[in-house]
Amino acid sequence: MPERLTADALHQPPDFGDLAFASTDELQDFEGLLGQPRATQAIEVALGVRQPGFNLYAMGRGGLGRHGALYDTLLKKAAEAPPARDWCYVQDFNDLQRPRALSLSAGMAIRLRADVVATVRGRFTIHASDAVDEVMTLLTGFPAGEADAATDRFPPDTVNGRIQVGLEQFVDVQKRLAREMHGAPAPKEQDDG
């Protein structure tokens, strides 16, 4: 049968006489994962992979220092790496749906922006607006127009009215062409009177 232990036998007071410091304030901050050399090595290897779609996943109980270790390692790697390039997207006037991407040396995007503003200042009027209707009025000189609540129609002498009429005409042409292609007869005109 095992021997019964006393409370004094269960407690072993630490001997702080061998410590080379008087206060923990004298110690340097610990970097990495304490007692986790394989995890630290795995982080280093993973951060060295330069392939698209490669990710690093750290799992474990809370309070183990994963977040701090990863953050410190990433900061160190970022400081050693060359500065990231600036990416700017500019309008491609030949393909309005796809802006062009410019890859510039670090810090050059701010200079490019300043140069563009300096170049157009005085040649163009720059307006800031949060509303498309306001911009349409500024660009065309015509009021944008508001739809009538009862008819959902815009006044014909407004930008939105002209767009509405143009779209209706476009739809009518597309319907006519579809009928002609498929040999369907044209619909009869209805008399509203």
Image (cartoon, grey):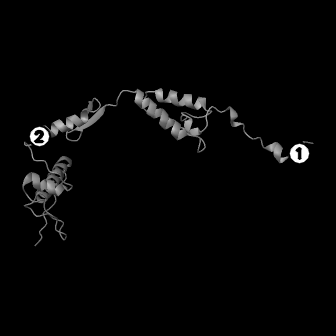
The answer to which image quadrant residue 92 occupies is top left
* The residue positioned farthest toward the bottom in the image shown: 193
Characterize the local packing of mark 2: few (<14), some (14-19) or many (20 or more) Cα atoms within 10 angstroms.
few
Residue 99 visible, this orientation: no
Characterize the local packing of mark 1: few (<14), some (14-19) or many (20 or more) Cα atoms within 10 angstroms.
few
Residue 33: x and y in percent read: 57, 34
Which disc number belongs to residue 120? Answer: 2
* The residue positioned farthest toward the right in the image shown: 1
Q: Residue at x 16, y 59 (%)?
A: 187
Secondary-structure class at tag 1:
loop
Residue 146: x and y in percent read: 15, 64
The answer to which image quadrant residue 77 occupies is top left
Residue 183: x and y in percent read: 19, 50
Tell me the quarter of the image containing the C terminus: bottom left
According to the picture, the residue beneath numbered tag 1 turns out to be 4
Q: Residue at x 51, y 28 (%)?
A: 44
Mark 2, mark 1: which one is toward the viewer?
1
Secondary-structure class at tag 2:
helix
Nearer to me, 142 or 55: 55
Q: Is residue 87 above or below residue 164?
A: above
Q: Amino acid at mark 1?
A: Arg
Q: Amino acid at mark 2?
A: Val
